[in-house]
Image (cartoon, rainbow, N blue to C red):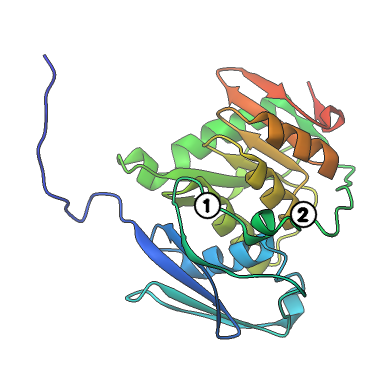
Amino acid sequence: MAIVEYAAPVPRETAERPIRIYLNDAPVAVSQGSPYGLHELAVGYLLSEGLLSDRDRLVEVTADPEKAEVYVASGEQAVDGYVPLHRVTSSGCAQSALMRSGTCVPDAARLSTTARFDADALLSCMDELCERSPRRNTGECVHGCGLGAPGANRLLLVREDIGRHNAMDKLIGQAWLDRVDVRDKALFITGRISAEMALKAYRGGCPVLVSRKSATDEAARRAASLGVTLVSHCRDGRLRVLSCPERISG
């Protein structure tokens, strides 16, 4: 017989808030997500939108946790024709303003790397991501994202959020803030991969994107055209390589 629990929301339940992101005091987006890791979330989102690229031109990042607002000051400005997506994006399936405007990849040079990744190491890193995700392992409905180096079966960074898009933004944003070079690294995500997530990996400069779950056909096509190795169903001793397979061995 099933056990049914009726309870009002309490602090241990998964938190979700509208998070407002500003670049040089101009509103850029409102992202529905987890109200922690706001600095890296904002930076990662702006990187994936192509609004940040030069770490040395970043001035500061400040956050107001109570209001769930993040302010990024940079010497860089939005590209001509960019229209900010200043509305609430779903925590389940956020949308990029660049995807919406039809100018999602104005500088679509394919990613290139000499890094090679062992299949067994990818499986180990995915297992570690699932084990190392603290909120996920205490019952919260969050996604985890990790960063791994070639030849290593341990992750360098792990970030979480209620939205898989936000989890990836946080991971890429933290790596960029810490000046961690991701051009020879792999991203690991617990959720499925959409076309926009393949674009986020490309925008972040990461040549390999690995998911424990599935990927859409458009994600595979976009990854192939951008030079991103896309790996799905990485679990239970198996994985599926959908694009740029030369980077995976074993």
Q: Taking 118 as reference, is 178 left or right?
A: left
Q: Is residue 179 visible?
A: yes
Kindly report the distance in space between the C-alpha atoms of the residues bearing marks 1 and 2: 20 Å
Element assignment for label 2: loop
Q: Quadrant of the C terminus?
A: top right
| Residue wearing tag 1 | 94
Residue drawn at point x = 56 percent, y = 30 percent: 212
Residue 178 at x, y = what percent?
A: 65, 67
Q: Taking 86 as reference, is 217 left or right?
A: right
Q: How many marks?
A: 2
Amino acid at the residue labelled 2: Gly
Mark 1 or 2 closer to N-term? 1
Residue 9 at x, y = what percent?
A: 17, 51
Amino acid at the residue labelled 1: Ala
Residue 186 at x, y = what percent?
A: 70, 43
Mark 2 burial class by Cα count in 10 Å: few <14, some 14-19, many 20+: many
Q: Quadrant of residue 203?
A: bottom right
Q: Looking at the picture, tell me which residue is in the foreground, 49 or 129.
A: 49
Vertical arrangement, residue 66 with respect to residue 96, above or below: below
In this view, the mark in front (1 or 2) = 1
| Residue wearing tag 2 | 205
Residue drawn at point x = 20 percent, y = 56 percent: 11
Element assignment for label 1: loop
